[in-house]
Image: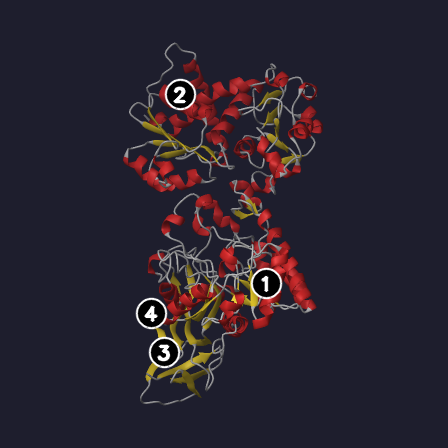
Amino acid sequence: MIKHLLSGGDLDADTATEILDTAAEMATVAGREIKKLPALRGRTVVNLFYEDSTRTRISFEAAAKRLSADVINFSAKGSSVTKGESLKDTALTLQAMGADAVVIRHPASGAPHRLANWVDGSVVNAGDGTHEHPTQALLDAYTMRSRLGRLAGLSVAVVGDVLHSRVARSNVLLLSTLGAKVTLVGPPTLIPVDIAGALAPGTNVSYDLDSVLPNVDVVMMLRVQRERMNDSYFPSAREYARRYGLDGPRMRRLPEHAIVMHPGPMNRGMEITPEVADSPRSTIVEQVTNGVSVRMAVLYLLLGGNNR
Amino acid sequence: MTAYLITSVSVVGAAPTDLLIRDGVIAAVGPGLTAPDATVVDGAGLVALPGLVDLHTHLREPGREDAETVESGSRAAALGGYTAVCAMANTSPVADTAGVVEQVWRLGREAGLVDVQPIGAVTVGLAGERLAELGAMADSAAQVRIFSDDGHCVADPKLMRRALEYVKAFDGIIAQHAEEPRLTEGAQMHEGEVSTRLGLIGWPAVAEEAIIARDVLLAEHVGSRLHVCHVSTAGSVEVLRQAKARGVRVTAEVTPHHLLLTDERAETYDPVYKVNPPLRTAADIAALRAALADGVIDVIATDHAPHAVEDKECEWAYARPGMLGLETALSIALDVLGPEWDLIAERMSRTPARIAGLTGHGVDPAPGVPANLTLIDPAAHRTIEPAELASRSRNTPYARMTLPGRIVATFLRGEPTVLDGKAVK
C-alpha cells in the first residue's frame, strides 16, 4: 500500500480497486446498529484544515471515528496559524504529538506534498488549492461503480470550471486509470491548457454540452463560483447557466441509465437546477454517504489496518 | 602592492603564456616572464578570462540583511569569478534616490571584493506611477547608468516611453522586467502542461513577449537604449531577433537557470525552483541557447536572488521567487556552452561591461589594462553544497548537482579577491 494519498495519480488500478472494494465492506458497517470497528484503536488522525470545509472535515472525522481512531481537529481559524506559524512548524508540532495520519485541506496547491516532507505519518490530501482532491475522486468512482456496475468503458462528462477544480483533476487521473473515458466540458476560458498531456492522454475536451450529453453514462457538474464572472471567465451567471447549466430539458437528452453527480456544495440555479438535483438520476446525497465509507477505506489501508 | 606572476595560463583559450600583474594593471604578457619580487601563481591548465560582470544581482542591502549583504554578496560574486556586479534597486528602502544608490555604492567600496555598481529604480518606490529622480542618481557618486524596476514591470506604456527618452540625456539605459501584470495575476509558474497538472496558476509566455514587443517599438520610436532582463521564452527570442535586424538599440540577457532547468522541477512543489520569470520548457531552453550562441541574446546575467530560509521553506504559493546564481553561473555557462572561452568572455564579461559602461572591466588581459581577471580550472568538477556557499542564503537550485569548472583565483585591479578557490577576505 502507498504511504500517502496526495494525488489521484498515486493510485494504480489495483490499489484503487482495493480501496473501492474495502469501501464496500466499510459501507456494511454503516448499516449496523453499532457503526464502529476497532481497526484503528490507539491510532491518532489529525484533521488539519486551513479552509472552511465542514462537509469534508466531518466526513473524515466520521470515517476515523468509525474505525475507533483518536481524532484531533486542528482548524486554522483561531489557532496559532493565524498568528503566522509556518506549515513546517505546525507539521513538527503534529509530529511531536504522534500523529499517525494527517488529513490536510489547504488553499495552496501542493501544501500536502510539502507536509509529507516534514511528518513521519501518512498524509491524506483533502483538497489543495486548485490541484487535487483524491478522496472525492474515489467516492465519485465508488458511486459510479455502485450505480452502473462498472467503471471500465464508462463515458464521463465533467462539466464546468475545470481550471480551478481540484475535483476535476483527481477525477480525470483516477477514472483514466480505471478505464473510463472522460470528456471535459466548459467555456474555453475555464479549460486549462494542455489538459490531455498534463493529466491523461485520451481525455477529450468539448465546449458544447448539448452535443456531449446523449453519449455519456455519467455527467458530473462542478461548482462554479459566481466571483469568476468578475474576472472575465464568462460574461454573466445567466449566460453561464444557459450554456453550461444542467436543467430539465438538457437532462432529458441523457441516455436513460445515465446519472448526474455533483461534489457539492451546489449553486442551485447556476450549474444545476433543483429539478435535476432532486431527480432520481441525481446521486448527490449518495455521494456524501459513500464519502464516509471511502475515507474509512483510505485511512484503514494507509495506516496498515489490513496488516494487523 | 604585491606583484603576481601567473605562469602558463591560457588567456581566453589561447596557447599558454605568462601574465605579470603589477600596480593594479597587467604589466606584461608573454611566455617565460620573470619577476623575482612577484608571488607566483601556477596557471598550468587554467584559463584566464576578463573578470566576469553581472548585470543583474540582488544584494538585498539595505533592508534584508538576513538574506544577503553587500559584503556577503560581493564575496559570492568574487568566488564566482566576478569583478563587477550591478545591484538591483528593489531593496528596502528602494534605490530610487541618490542617497540610497550612494549608500549601496559605498558599501561595495568598503567590502572591496567586486565593484558594486548600483542600478537605480525607474519609478518612485517601484510603484510604476511616476519617475524617480533619474538624473540625481546619474549625477551621484554612484554614477548610475542602468535603471530598472526589476521585480516589477514598467507596465504603463507612457511612463516607459518617458523613461526611455529621459535617460538619453546621460546615456542611460532602461532594463525592463518584461511581465504584463494583468496577464500574470497570481501566477506561480510557467503556464503549460505542468501548471495544469499541478494546479498552479500559469504565467503565460505571451505576458513577457507582449511587453518586449511593445518596448522594442517604443525604443525604436524614441531612439533610446533598451535592455531586456532575464529573457525566458522562445517567442521573446523571435521578437528580439526581428528588432535587432531592424537596428533597434536593444540588448538582452538570459539567466543560467533559464538555460538549464525546466518547469518540470516544480513537480516537487519545492519553492527553491520558484523564480520570476518562471522556469520554462525544453523548447524554450533550446531557443535561448541558440540565441546566446548567435548573439540575439547578448549577456548571461545571474538574477542572483537570495532569500531567507523561511521565505522558501513553505508552501509554493507563499514562497518568494528567486534563486542564487553568482557562485554557479560560470559552471552553468561551461556546462551549456562547452569550453567556448571567447563566447563565454563575450557574454559574461565584455558585453555586460560595455552595456553597463564599466570601463576597466570586460577587457582581455593585455599590457596596460586594469588587472580585472579570473582564473578557471575547466577540468575540475564540484558538487554544489548549499551550506558551503558564501551567500548568506541557501536557495540554490543546483544543490548536490555536480557541475564542471572551478574558479581558482579572481583579481580586482591587481589585488586577489580569491586565491586557491578561497575568498581572500
Which disc, if any, is residue B415?
3
Rate crowding at label 4 as few (under 14), some (14 to 19) or many (20 or more) other CA atoms within 10 Å.
some
Res B331 visible: no
Do marks 1 and 3 both belong to one polypeptide chain? Answer: yes
Residue occupied by mark 1? B163
Q: Amino acid at mark 1?
A: Ala
Res A51 → quadrant? top left
* Mark 1 belongs to chain: B
Rate crowding at label 2 as few (under 14), some (14 to 19) or many (20 or more) other CA atoms within 10 Å.
many
Q: Nearer the viewer, residue A210 or B107?
A: B107
Vertical comparison of B138 with A254: above or below: below
Rate crowding at label 3 as few (under 14), some (14 to 19) or many (20 or more) other CA atoms within 10 Å.
many
Residue occupied by mark 4? B423
Q: Amino acid at mark 4?
A: Ala
Rate crowding at label 1 as few (under 14), some (14 to 19) or many (20 or more) other CA atoms within 10 Å.
many
| Residue drawn at x 66%, y 30% as measured from the top left | A240
Do marks 4 and 3 both belong to one polypeptide chain? Answer: yes
Is label 2 or label 3 in front?
A: 3
Residue B126 x, y percent position in the rendering: 51, 56
Is label 1 or label 3 in front?
A: 1
Residue occupied by mark 2? A62
Could you tell me how far apart the alpha carbons at marks 4 and 1 are, in whole angstroms? 39 Å
Evaluate if marks 4 and 1 touch, with contact meaning CB atoms under 8 Å apart: no
> Can you say which quadrant of the picture contains the N terminus of chain B?
bottom left
Could you tell me how far apart the alpha carbons at marks 2 and 1 are, in whole angstroms? 62 Å
